[in-house]
Image (cartoon, rainbow, N blue to C red):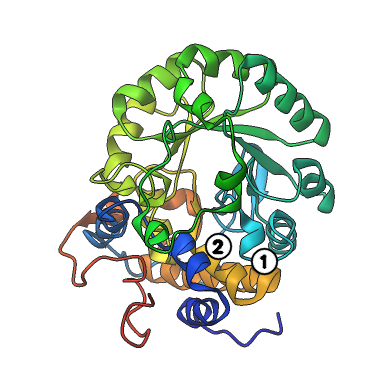
Amino acid sequence: MSLEFVTNQEIIQAARKNLTQDIWDYLSGGAESETTMRRNRLGFDYLALRPRVCVDVSKIDTSTTFLGQKLRIPVMMAPIGSLQTITPEGGVAVAKAAKEFGTMNFVSSVTQPSLEEIAASTDHPKIFQLYIRGGLDWCKEIVDRVLKAGYVGLCLTVDTAHYSRRERQMMNRYLPPNKRTETARHYQGMLTWELMAAIKQHAGLPFILKGVATAEDAKIALDHGVDVIYVSNHGGRQLDHGRGTIDVLPEIVEVAKGKADIVLDGGVTRGTDVLKALALGCRAVTIGKLQGWGLGASGKDGLVRVLEILEDELIIDMALLGVTRIDQVNPSFVCKSYPVTYPHEMSAFPHIPGRRLV
């Protein structure tokens, strides 16, 4: 990479300079009081790492696999709607970054360009994320397009029965393009386990359920044969006063008992965050806000640089933790501790002047 960013803090600052207030608030904010969003960060801050010493860590392997596909690091791109507002290439920029770096991306059904154009832009494996905007026949039609386009997995988002009150956006009188043009969003509120099962059966792809936040729903998902449980609260952008995703994770892992892989998003901004999630049972994590900040800083190249910096952090963190491979990270490497910063969307970056960019 030729970009001179050496920390993700610099990338966030560059994104703030490039993005309008509307887009910045859409990307960086949460719902109502933003309590859930802050708890995502606070949950990671309440965990400390327990390093082991006198271990040969001269060679570090950060790679893992997901759905049988190799990942250079256990970090993927979360689905983000209206990516075209952040960078002109939209979802194609994310696909190109994922391909160049060596990871996977989730393609949102409410971003641009079309699912076919994003699929055709690179030849690396991608996962399609579906929002329900019609009945079963409508869903089948979309899934048929997904299958024809060659996606390797299908992700169904289930925590958006109603669009939330995102007050940063509301005070700007701003709506993202996907919400301005939608006329059938009410179908998302009609989503049931039965409809989920019918979509899963029709797709015949590895099936990921995104938005699981309780052990009870994790058990139902397993009873329906879900392949991957995606622990998410939409980055704190849906139900306010929910728990942080890392706080939810242990009860999901306890229910899953290895029957399904688990991925997580929400507040992941550092290599140490990735290790904490892996230690508590995740196969991999995804990044949303950090992905958007990378795109806002310098499009595809900015996102690749975000991933390179995360990789560098992971290599150092793993060596200092006393592990050489991802599969060595387990619960013995984490414990409860005390946070030292006030949680917000950028609190993991203490060297940003003023600490917050609003």
Residue 132 x/y as whole percent: 57, 28
Look at mark 1 in the image and give the residue it sits on: 87
| Residue 16, position as x, y percentages in the image | 50, 78
**Which picture quadrant has residue 199?**
top right
Q: Left or right of 288: which side holds 111?
A: right
| Residue 68 screen position, x and y as percent | 66, 38
Horizontal side of 25 relative to 355 (left or right) equals right
Name the residue type under label 2: Gln
In the rendered image, the residue lying farthest to the left is 338
> Neighbour class for label 2 at 10 Å: few (<14), some, many (≥20)?
many
**Which residue: 59% across, 13% down?**
198
Q: Disc 1 versus disc 2: distance between alpha carbons?
A: 12 Å
Amino acid carrying label 1: it is: Thr
Quadrant of the frame with the N terminus: bottom right
Height in image: 8 above or below 253? below
Numbered disc in front, either 1 or 2 = 1
Report the residue marked by disc 2. Answer: 291
Residue at horizontal 53%, vertical 32%? 185
Residue at image coords 25%, 44%: 243
Residue 306's place in the image compared with 211, above or below, is below
Does any portion of residue 57 appear in the rendered image? no
Q: Does residue 77 appear in this view?
A: yes
Task: Report the quarter where the C terminus lies.
Answer: bottom left
Relative placement, left or right, of 155 versus 126 is: left
Q: Residues within 10 Å of mark 1 (few under 14, many from 20)?
A: many
Q: Secondary structure at mark 2?
A: helix
* Count of residue discs: 2
Q: Specify which label sits upstream in the sequence, 1 or 2.
A: 1
